[in-house]
Amino acid sequence: MTSVTRTEPRVVRPRAVVLATVIDAALIVLFVAIGRRSHDEDSALVGFLTTAWPFLAGAAIGWLAARAWRRPLAVWPTGVVVWAVSVVLGMLLRAVSGQGVQPSFVIVTALVLAAFLVGWRALSLLVARTRSRRHP
């Protein structure tokens, strides 16, 4: 039995890249909105953006580090790298900009962003596999 080796790179639709980028950004914005609301912080745009920018910047760097445009829907490495860099760089940027990085906030951020940034990709993979089994 011979094994098939794929020599050509998999073609990624530009629409998938844009969609994944928008979903990641929207989920980070949702995380910030939920957090600010749960702490009864005002909804002023400046306060919202001050909270959001470190994580959005972290996600952007995570996209570059993972070369996410190659496999934007992949749980590994894309989702995991984007999540990890979003959390780590987001916290570092918060710290250097004078925002809080209490341990409880770091833990909650890591868990919620894992569920969001890795979770939607895992769900997408599950749906795709289920569809492919139903329609061979």
Image: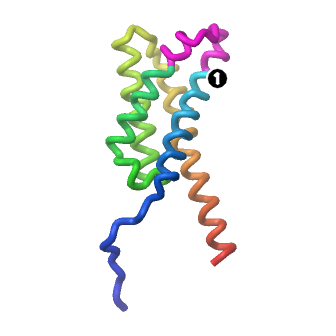
Q: Residue at x 54, y 39 (%)?
A: 22
Q: Quadrant of the C terminus?
A: bottom right
Residue furthest out toward the right: 134
Q: How is the image coloured?
A: rainbow
Q: How many marks?
A: 1
Whether residue 41 is in magenta: the answer is yes
Q: Amino acid at mark 1?
A: Ile
Q: Residue at x 38, y 54 (%)?
A: 70
Place of residue 83 in the rendered image (x, y in percent of width and height, measured from the top left): 45, 38
Q: Position of residue 128 (x, y in %)?
A: 60, 62
Q: Is residue 88 above or below residue 125?
A: above
Instruction: Confirm whether residue 48 shows in the render.
Output: yes
- Residue 73 lies, in percent from the top left, at 50, 53
Residue toward you, 122 or 132: 132
Sort mark 1 into few (<14), some (14-19) or many (20+) by Cα contacts within 10 Å. Answer: few
Seen in the picture, residue 122 relative to 23 is either above or below; the reply is below
Taking the image as shown, residue 48 lies to the left or right of residue 76, namely right
- Check the image and name the residue furthest to the front: 14
Residue under the image location 51 percent in, 52 percent down: 16
Q: Is residue 74 visible?
A: no
Query: Residue 28: within the magenta?
Result: no
Which residue of the protein is positioned furthest toward the bottom in this rendering?
1
Position of residue 47 in the picture relative to residue 87 (left or right)? right
Asked which secondary structure carries label 1, the reply is helix
**Residue under the image location 34 percent in, 13 percent down:** 96
- The quadrant in which the N terminus is found is bottom left
- The chief SS type of the magenta part is helix
Q: Which residue is tagged 1?
A: 34
Above or below, comparing residue 78 to residue 113 in the picture:
below
**Quadrant position of residue 112:** top right
Camera-side residue of 56 and 109: 56
Image: magenta residue range: 34-51
